Image (tube, rainbow, N blue to C red):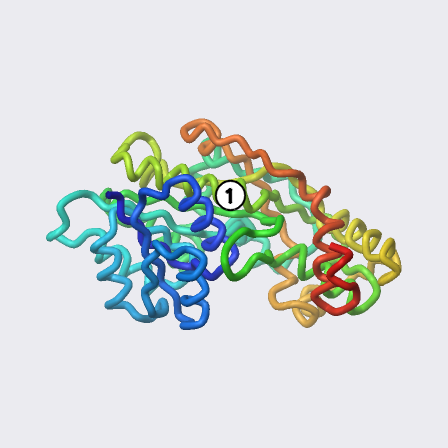
Amino acid sequence: MTRIFLTGASGYIGGNVLHLLLEKHPEYEVSVLVRDAAKGAKIAEVYPRVRVVQGELDSLAVVEEEARRADVVVHAAASNHIESAEAVFRGLSDPTREKTGYWIQVSGATLLSAPEIEKGVFGEPSEKIYGDIDNEEDIKSIIRQYSAKRVVDSFILNSPSSPKTAVVVPPIIYGQGQGPIKQRSVQIPELARITLQHKTGYQVGRGLSVWSNVHIADISSIFVALVEKAAAGDDGPYWNENGIYLAENGAISFGDISRRVAEEATKLGLSSTDVKEVDHAEADELSPHAGILLGTNARAKAQRARKVLGWTPTGGSLQEEIAETVRIEAVALGLLSKSTL
C-alpha cells in the first residue's frame, strides 16, 4: 500500500491534485493536513477514505511524523514556508524508515521573474524563455542568487540525494478546480473581479509582459505522474538534480488578457472595453501582489515533463476560459444570477 501525505488539500492546486490522485489511484492510502476543522470535515465527507490530520504548516512535529510515515509527500500548501519544508525533509530522511522517501514540492513562476522584480521593471516585454532542460543551470542560478526569497527552492536544491525530490513550477493556472474546497485560481479571476467592480479593464504598465499558462487539470497531472513514479520506486531521471518541472500550454501578454476580460465583461453589460494603465503600486492596491502577478515575465518550456513523464496537456486554452471566468466572478459578486452559468 502506497502511503501519500498531501498538504494543501483545501487549496486550488492541492485540492485538484487530491481529486485526480484518488480518481486514478483508489488503492493509495492518503492523509491530508488541514488547519480548519470545518474544511477537514468537508474533505472527509467527499473523500471518506482520506485520513484528515488536524494541523497547520507550523505544526512541525505533526508534519514531520506524517512525512516519516509516508512513502510520498506532496507539499502543495505553500512554496516558501521553510519550517514545514525542513520538517518534511526530517521525516523523509528519518533513519528508521524502511525505504527511500519521495518529496514533490510546489513552487511558483515568480522564480523566473526574480531578476525583473529586483530591478522594479513591470509591464515590459522580455525575450527570455526558460526551458527546464535547455536552461536548467540558468534556473538553478536564479534560485542560488535569490535564495533569500526562494528559501524552499534553495533548500531542496542543496539537499542530499535522499529523499528523492521534485519541484513543480506552475505558471498562470486557469480553469475551474475539482477540489473539495477552493476551486478558484488567482490571476485571471482577480483581474476579472477588479474589472467588474471598477467597470473598466486594468493592465500593469504597458501590458507587454508575458507569463506562460496551463490548465489546472494539466498541472495536476504532472504531480500525479510524479507520484506514480515514486509509488513504483522508479529512480530514473526524475528527481533531485533532474527534478525541476516547468509547466505550460501557451503564453499570452497580460495586456491581451486584460483586453479580453474587459470585452467579456462588456458583453455582459458590466464594464466598458477600456483598459486603464496602472503602475506596480496601484496594481497592488487593486489586488494583493498584482504588480508582480500581472506585470512581470515568466515564460517557460515544459521540456522535462514532456520528455521523461510523457506529459501532454489536454485542457482548453486560457483564451477559451476567459469568458467563463468572467461569468463566474460576476455571479460571485452578485452581478449575475447563477442561472447564467
Q: Say left or right for 161 vs 326.
A: left
Q: Say left or right for 225 vs 247.
A: left
| Quarter where residue 325 is shown | bottom right
In which quadrant is the N terminus drawn?
A: top left
Q: Is residue 200 above or below residue 244?
A: below
x, y (%) of residue 102?
Answer: 28, 45
> Residue at point 27% right, 43% down?
164
> Residue at point 45% right, 40% down?
222
Q: Say left or right for 267 vs 135.
A: right
Q: Is residue 197 above or below residue 261?
A: below
| Quarter where residue 51 is shown | bottom left
x, y (%) of residue 237?
Answer: 33, 31
> Residue at point 32% right, 52% down?
30
Q: Say left or right for 39 vs 328.
A: left
* Closer-to-camera residue (32/149): 32
In which quadrant is the C terminus drawn?
A: bottom right
Q: Can residue 78 be seen? A: no
What residue would you read off at disc 1?
219
Residue found farthest to the left: 96
* Closer-to-camera residue (43/36): 43
